[in-house]
Amino acid sequence: MQIIRDIAMLRRAVSALQQGGKSVALVPTMGALHEGHVSLVRMAGRVADHVVVSIFVNPTQFGPNEDYAAYPRDEARDAALLAGEGVALLWAPDVATMYPGGHATHIEVSGLGADYCGAARPGHFDGVATVVAKLFNQVRPDVAIFGEKDWQQLAIIRRMARDLDFALDILGAPIARDKDGLALSSRNGYLSKDLREAAVALPDALKAAAKAIAGGGEVAAALAQAEADILKGGFDSVDYVALADADSLERLTEFRKPARLLAAARIGKTRLIDNLPVG
Ligand code: PAF
């Protein structure tokens, strides 16, 4: 596996991989790879001839009081894992390569980024959309894979790629979960043993709410119950539990398909997100 940090070298290497009409799938990541990322890499390997993974802890998607500095980084470990998965190329630029001095352009996907995680993390999705657009232009893949765990992020990236005419397919990969149902996340590593055990209250509450809504229960009552269950299970606060149109992310007060339950909640110093389809 080649590890590349320079854009001109990256372009040459990707063109070489695409010779003879071969396809390239990109899996963008911030490193600290876990089984969830491995499932994205394996999906990429099934849909394209070659897999490129990017690792870049993107400063512009972290707020001033968020965990940018503390975000786990272990490139050697990540690279060994990716090499073992048959990844062709690791794109690992530094901050100065991604954002050279004077960088002044950003992308805002209006509306879709305002609610849910966007409300709790102002500017977060502008940072995500900007870095993902840059990764698409740098790598020029045929397809890119994103986890469905961040459903709002996936919807924003799909809209951005459509609006800006990026010539690639975007695929969502199903959420990888631990045995007890907690969605895999690099941030789960921040949790003590007790908090990790309690965190299962989040997927459990979403499962119960999805069942109630799909079974004809009142949406507001199911959402209120889910919020109460998450807090009772040991979370300190709930940023949101909402039923949303799965594509437009519009909040739904009545169930209609396609719908997605979205939630974010804080336990200790850690903010976890999760979502489930309904019906
Ligand atoms: O989901 C992530 O890991 C990040 O938001 C992404 C898509 C790699 C952009 O930095």
Image (spheres, helix red, strand yellow):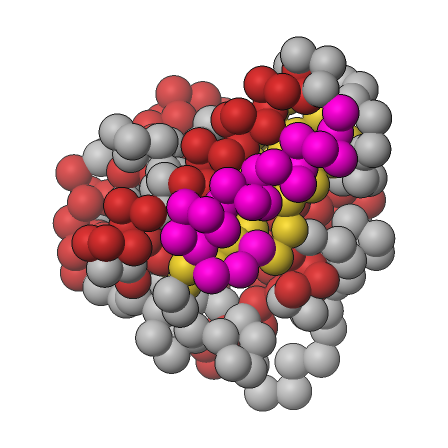
Image point 59% across, 28% down: which residue?
209
Is residue 38 at least partly visible in the picture?
no
Q: Nearer the viewer, residue 260 or 127?
A: 260
Number of numbered discs visible in the structure rendering: 0
What's the magenta region? 218-238
Q: Nearer the viewer, residue 63 or 182?
A: 182
As for residue 224 lying within the magenta part, the answer is yes
Image point 55% across, 51% down: which residue?
264
In the picture, residue 235 is in which quadrant? bottom left
Q: Is residue 121 above or below residue 212?
A: below
Q: Nearer the viewer, residue 66 or 46?
A: 66
As for residue 226 lying within the magenta part, the answer is yes
Q: Is residue 85 above or below residue 33?
A: above
148 sits left or right of 122 in the view:
left
Q: Is residue 236 above or below residue 199?
A: below
In the picture, residue 275 is in which quadrant? top right
Horizontal and vertical percent for residue 12? 43, 52
Horizontal and vertical percent for residue 191? 28, 59
| Quadrant that contains the C terminus | top right
114 sits left or right of 101 in the view:
right
Q: Is residue 62 above or below residue 10?
A: below
Residue with the most extreme bottom position: 101
Horizontal and vertical percent for residue 175? 44, 32
Is residue 184 at least partly visible in the picture?
yes
169 sits left or right of 252 in the view:
left
Horizontal and vertical percent for residue 162? 77, 39
Image point 15% across, 49% down: which residue?
80
Image point 38% across, 65% down: which residue?
268
Q: Nearer the viewer, residue 249 or 192?
A: 192
The prevailing secondary structure element of the residues shown in magenta is: helix
